[in-house]
Amino acid sequence: MGVFGRPEKQLVALTVNGERHDVALEPRATLLEAVRYTLGLTGSKQGCDKGDCGACTVLIDGKPMLACLSLAIEAQGRAVTTIEGLAKDGKVSPVQDAFDVCGALQCGFCQSGMMLSATALLAKCEKPNREQIKDALAGNLCRCTGYTQILNAVEVASGQRSVAERDERPTTQAQAAAK
Amino acid sequence: MLTLPPFEYHAPMELADALALLQKHAGKVKLIAGGTDLVPNMKHRLFMPEHVVGLKQISELNGVRGEGGFLVIGAMTSIADLARNPRVALLFPSLARAATAIAGPQLREMGTLGGNLCLDTRCVYYNQTHFWRKALGYCLKKDGTVCHVVKGGQKCVAAASNDTAPVLLTLGASVELASPNGRRAIPLEEFYVADGVANTVIEPNEILTKVRVPIPRAGLVTGYQKLRIRAAIDYPSLCVAVAAQQQADGKLEWVRMVISALGSKPHTVKRLEGFQGRALDAATIAELGQAAHRQCHPLTNINVETGWRREMIPVFVRRAFAEAMK
Ligand SMILES: Cc1cc2nc3c(=O)[nH]c(=O)nc-3n(C[C@H](O)[C@H](O)[C@H](O)COP(=O)(O)OP(=O)(O)OC[C@H]3O[C@@H](n4cnc5c(N)ncnc54)[C@H](O)[C@@H]3O)c2cc1C
Ligand code: SF4
Ligand code: FES
Ligand code: FES
């Protein structure tokens, strides 16, 4: 026990976006607190802080998980990807690009979580249909967009919709064809 | 922002070490599996353990394998792995369906089967911040002396809200519990008790290690239906799990129905012996629905209308059997 009866900080080795960080953290620090307030990676958002909204979504070993419910100390030895890690060599990823050109955001608070969930989906399924996209993004809530542009953006990112038709609602035929 | 209360963290590699830690810090320790139930509850100050023991490093708690006539599922198997396991989908479609219906994608990757079976019961007066509960004067389940659901009630009736429990009950599953004194296997039917404060018989020094599900014979059909406000992410407001063993001639050998998310214990519908020998046709299914309806009385423990939750029971019994026989 450290001062004030609090457990002492421990050295925690986090691998975030391919870079190793040795940081001193209390065992109770969540992964979200660690990336935002210790590493300064504020792209991961703190929404509800209790598992409801998905704004804090990060990838842990490629799988979308909620940083607000993960203990930082349990992320040791695992590869954490935050929104800051999607761009490579100064170029945004196809998912980021599609969200941008589709105007798939308004306030932007849900976006990093959305894009990470979408990235995880496209890594395991190159051409997901509309239902699969909805399922994969079900744990990410958006207050603003009404979701249509977001779903369209994932279709654009996976080459199933052209930017020119980015605003069109999915036709019944398009949905049937996707199935 | 919801911060966690302070604790010391331990990550044992062996089950024996985890059990020793439970013993050593008895009364001041909690296990953490996926953390998707424990972490929000700790953030709400429903639990303030001085020690938290992580189960992620213990490899014997992982994996799905066949063993004799059973499918054995390790307690630390993630809900997502359960949902996408081809053997589970083939042998127990209702279990795969229940796993797929738990929370959203991120929580399914994090949450585990053991954590799901040991999920704390839920109540609109309990799953709240400390500030909120204090303003109300607390309740029986935590820090208080009254129940806000049943006026004058002496027993907490917070809702069993785990999706896999009702399904595994219909499948005749059992769980293995390890303690420093050895291991015991108990039928899931004896695992749950009607007490909202602690609705399982697991002792504080025990760890749930695995779930054993008997591999079905030909003719077993299973189904699962879940009522929730937002169909993509919410906890259940009502769960209906059914299983029926049919003979070669299609007549019923036995039928089981478990209704949950209403009271503190998943309810196994009683007195279904009379259905033995009957065909599983529309008339039988309608009677089964009525039997379940008669025995279930939802409470205002969650913020979803009780009338709706009750009237959906026969509807879900019908849909669950329709799905089972597809
Ligand atoms: C927004 C939200 C929505 C959710 N929706 C659903 C839903 O629809 N359906 C549903 O069923 N659940 C739901 N959950 C709850 C939860 O995500 C799942 O039930 C999950 O499977 C719990 O597993 P876990 O490993 O995360 O449990 P943990 O939080 O790690 O543990 C839960 C409890 O079980 C104990 N425990 C865990 N493992 C063991 C073990 N092996 N032996 C003994 N004790 C153990 C812990 O000490 C703790 O008390 C939801 C959660 C959130 C935050
Ligand atoms: S059922 Fe009653 S005692 Fe139990 S958590 Fe709800 S209000 Fe509290
Ligand atoms: S901040 Fe993690 S789910 Fe809302
Ligand atoms: S853009 Fe505002 S929450 Fe999604």
Image (tube, coloured by chain):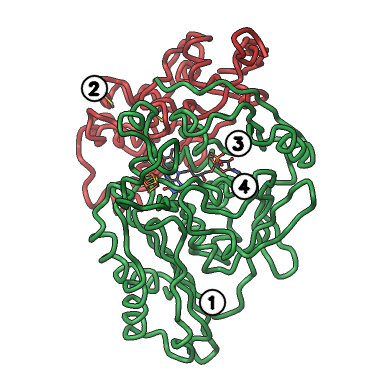
Chain colours: A red, B green
Indicate the amino acid at tag 4.
Thr
Report the chain holding disc 4.
B
Q: Earlier in the sequence, mark 1 or mark 4?
A: 4
Type of amino acid at the residue the image marks with label 3: Ile
Residue neighbourhood size for the residue with mark 2, other residues' Cα within 10 Å, grouped as few (<14), some (14–19), many (≥20): few
Both marks 1 and 2 on one chain: no
The nearer-to-camera label among 1 and 3 is: 3
Q: Position of residue B46 (x, y in %)?
A: 47, 34
Q: Of the residues shown, which amino acid type is indicated by label 2?
A: Gln
B123 sits left or right of A164 in the view: right
Secondary structure beneath disc 2? Answer: loop
Assess mark 3: CB under 8 A from ligand 1?
A: yes
Compare residues B83 and B35 and report the one nearer the observer: B35
What mark, if any, has residue B32 been given in the picture?
3
Q: Which residue is under mark 1?
A: B220
Q: Quadrant of the N terminus of chain A?
A: top right
Q: CA distance from mark 1 to mark 2?
A: 50 Å
